[in-house]
Amino acid sequence: MPNTRYKKDSRYAADMAVYCRQMSEDNSGEISRLKRNLVRALREDVTPKQRQVLLLYYAQGKNMREIGEALGVDKSTVCRTIKRGERRLQRCLRYGAERYLMGMEQETRT
């Protein structure tokens, strides 16, 4: 294993990363459910303006200045809109995750 600068209790950080990967269970199913729920929350729980700005920022990789110029608003307005949309999505996924997961499971059963 390559030598690394980061040591903790005589263990290398790379050793811990390998150990964690080997010990963790496969969570690809949970990640795909989370992605589906995120898309659903993006469609249903944020305002159209927040959705538009979030998609420009994350999906298209535009910076806040570019988004502001395209929409005719100030960069600070774009920043606030992104933060509000993110908070809304976080709340939805944190507090509504159980409801969404139960809904998704029922949809797949029918």
Image (cartoon, rainbow, N blue to C red):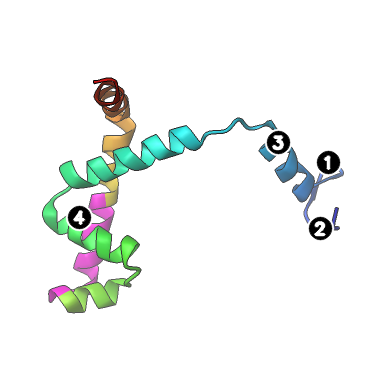
- Residue 93 part of the magenta segment: no
Q: Which residue is mark 4?
A: 51
Q: Is disc 3 placed on a helix, strand or loop? A: helix
Residue at x-position 29% and y-position 71%: 64
What stretch of residues is rendered in magenta? Answer: 71-85
Q: In the rendering, which numbered label is found on residue 9?
A: 1
Q: Earlier in the sequence, mark 4 or mark 2?
A: 2
- Cα distance, mark 3 to mark 2? 20 Å
**In the image, what residue type sits under mark 4?**
Arg
Query: Compared with residue 53, is residue 19 higher up or lower down, i.e. above or below?
Result: above
Q: Earlier in the sequence, mark 3 or mark 2?
A: 2
Q: Which residue is mark 2?
A: 4
Q: Earlier in the sequence, mark 3 or mark 4?
A: 3
Give the mark count.
4
Our reading of the magenta stretch's main secondary structure is helix
Q: Earlier in the sequence, mark 1 or mark 3?
A: 1
